[in-house]
Image: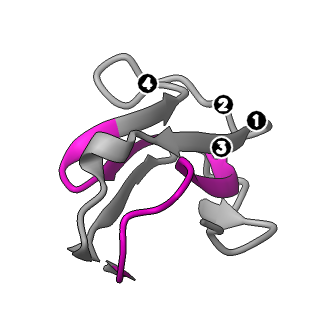
Amino acid sequence: TIPISKYPDSSLSVYLDRIHSADQTFWNGIKIGETGGLSPNYYAYWHKVRYYEIPNSLIGVGENHLEVFIECRESEFRCGMFRSIPLF
């Protein structure tokens, strides 16, 4: 949950750095980005950074919700977000 106290003067985005291995990212329930592919058409894309713009029409004053769905089938590596925490 991300609180926003006033409408932004410029566009916002979320930077997730790298995710192992595939993701779908949602802001307030609307998909804002996807890298790799989740099942049933799974394909890994862990080496690409995630930088997704959040359309101003999806930003609300008050609580906003960021959801990141991650799928990883590799057994030799740790899965999930790595290298940094999400930035807005």
- The amino acid pointed to by label 2 is Tyr
Q: Are marks 1 and 3 in contact (CB under 8 Å)?
A: yes
In the picture provided, is 54 more to the left or to the right than 12? left
Residue at the location (62% across, 52% down)? 75
Residue where numbered disc 1 is placed: 48
Image quadrant where residue 76 sits: bottom right
Dominant secondary structure (helix, strand or loop) of the stretch shown in magenta: strand
Secondary structure beneath label 1: loop
For marks 1 and 3, give the CA distance: 6 Å
Q: Name the kind of residue labelled 4 in the image.
A: Tyr
**Residue 60 rendering spot, x and y as whole percentages:** 24, 63
How far is mark 4 from mark 3, CA to CA? 17 Å
Residue 22 in view in this figure: no
Q: Amino acid at mark 3?
A: Arg
Q: Residue at x 67, y 75 (%)?
A: 85
- Asked whether the residues under the numbered discs 1 and 2 touch, taking CB atoms below 8 Å apart as contact, a structural biologist would say yes
Tag 3 residue: 50
Asked whether the beta carbons under mark 4 and mark 3 sit within 8 Å of each other, the answer is no
Mark in the foreground, 1 or 3: 3
Earlier-in-chain disc, 4 versus 3: 4
Magenta-tinted stretch: 4-31
The nearer-to-camera label among 1 and 2 is: 1
Residue neighbourhood size for the residue with mark 4, other residues' Cα within 10 Å, grouped as few (<14), some (14–19), many (≥20): some
For label 2, the residue is 45
For badge 1, the amino acid type reads Lys
What element does badge 2 sit on? loop
In the rendered view, would you say 31 is above or below 86?
above
Badge 3 density bin: few <14, some 14–19, many ≥20, Cα 10 Å: some
Judging by the rendered image, the residue that carries numbered circle 4 is 42
What SS does tag 4 mark? loop
Q: Earlier in the sequence, mark 3 or mark 2?
A: 2
- Rounded to the nearest whole Å, what is the CA distance between mark 3 and mark 2? 10 Å
